[in-house]
Every structure is written in structure tokens, then in C-alpha cells.
Amino acid sequence: MGEHSAGRAGFMVIAEVLLLGFIGGFLIGLMGIGGGIVLVPLLVYVLHMTQHAAQGTSLLVLLPPIGAGALYLYWKEKSVDLPAGLLCALGMLSGGYAGAFLAVGTNPRYLKEIFGILLMFFAALLWRKTDGARAAAARTTGNDA
């Protein structure tokens, strides 16, 4: 493989990683999701990282931009509860350490399975909540959902 094609392949990897970051950032800003739900699976399946590497990389990726990017716009709109956010951040700091301590020693296969089960569990909770909201709206308007 010549230098030119190696440089082109390197550029494509850089472009792919930047695109993954953009998608993650867009979804964080749009819906408040990204790291675990979007970025980790993309890192595993698109960049072929191990589950451990994807989770660790996701933590690194999210550290600077979340504090500066999307938060700024929510702060401007007065849509941030500072005391709740700081307390939750303190809990996440200690919980993140404890969770990472367990994850690092877990077999990658089991870690993927646990990750998938949690995603399905939270998806089911959200799905159930939207179904309940639809039913409540139908009762209020007298229409069937």
C-alpha cells in the first residue's frame, strides 16, 4: 500500500470518527442522550472497539463537550437546575468510579449483554410512558389513541 493510499485511509478514519462525534453531539443537544445510547454502540460496531474501550472512550469524549456545548444553550434558556445538577454530578462522580471499577474486571461479552439489557429496559420504560401519555390524551379529548 503506497503512502498516498495510507494517507487517504487515515483521512477516512479521521472523518469517520469526527462524524461519530457529530452524531453523538447532535443527539446530546437534541435529546440529552449520546454517550451510552449512541456513542458506545457506534464505537463498537463502526470502529470495532472492544466494549471496554468504547465505554472508556465515550467517557473521555463526553467530558469536555457536555460541560461547554449543549449545557451553555440550556443555561441561557434558564433550563438548568443548578443545585440538582451539582448534587447529581457528585453522585455520578462516585457512582461512575464504582461502576467503572466493576466494569473493568467484567468479561467483555457479559458487559455487552448487560449493556444491551439496560438499553432495552430503559427503552421499554420510555415506550410505556409514551403509551400512557397517549391514552391520557385520548381520555381528555374523547378520542381513541
Image (cartoon, grey):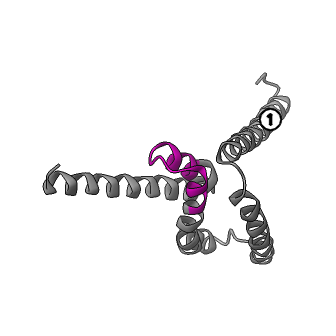
- Residue 117: x %, y % from top left: 74, 39
Pick the residue in front: 91 or 102: 102
SS of the residue under disc 1: helix
Q: Specify the quadrant that holds the C terminus.
A: top right
- Please identify the dominant SS of the magenta region: helix
Note whether 38 is above or below 95 in the view shown: above
Q: Residue at x 56, y 55 (%)?
A: 54
- The residue wearing badge 1 is 128
Towards the viewer: 68 or 39: 39
The quarter holding residue 135 reads top right
Place of residue 1 in the rendered image (x, y in percent of width and height, measured from the top left): 17, 49
Answer with left or right where residue 99 lies relative to residue 36.
right
- In-front residue for pair 72/2: 2
Q: Residues within 10 Å of mark 1 (few under 14, many from 20)?
A: few
**Residue sitting at x 53%, y 70%:** 65
Q: How many marks?
A: 1
Residue positioned 58% across, 71% down in the render: 63
Instruction: Identify the image quadrant of residue 141.
Output: top right
Foreground residue among 28 and 46: 46
Part of the protein shown in magenta? 38-56
Relative to 37, residue 18 above or below: below
Q: Position of residue 100 (x, y in %)?
A: 71, 63
Q: Residue at x 39, y 58 (%)?
A: 18
As drawn, 124 above or below 145: below
Residue 81 seen: no
Residue at the far top in the pictured view: 144
- Inspect the image, locate mark 1, and give the three-letter code of the amino acid beneath it: Arg
Q: How far from the left and from the top, in percent, is residue 86? A: 76, 77
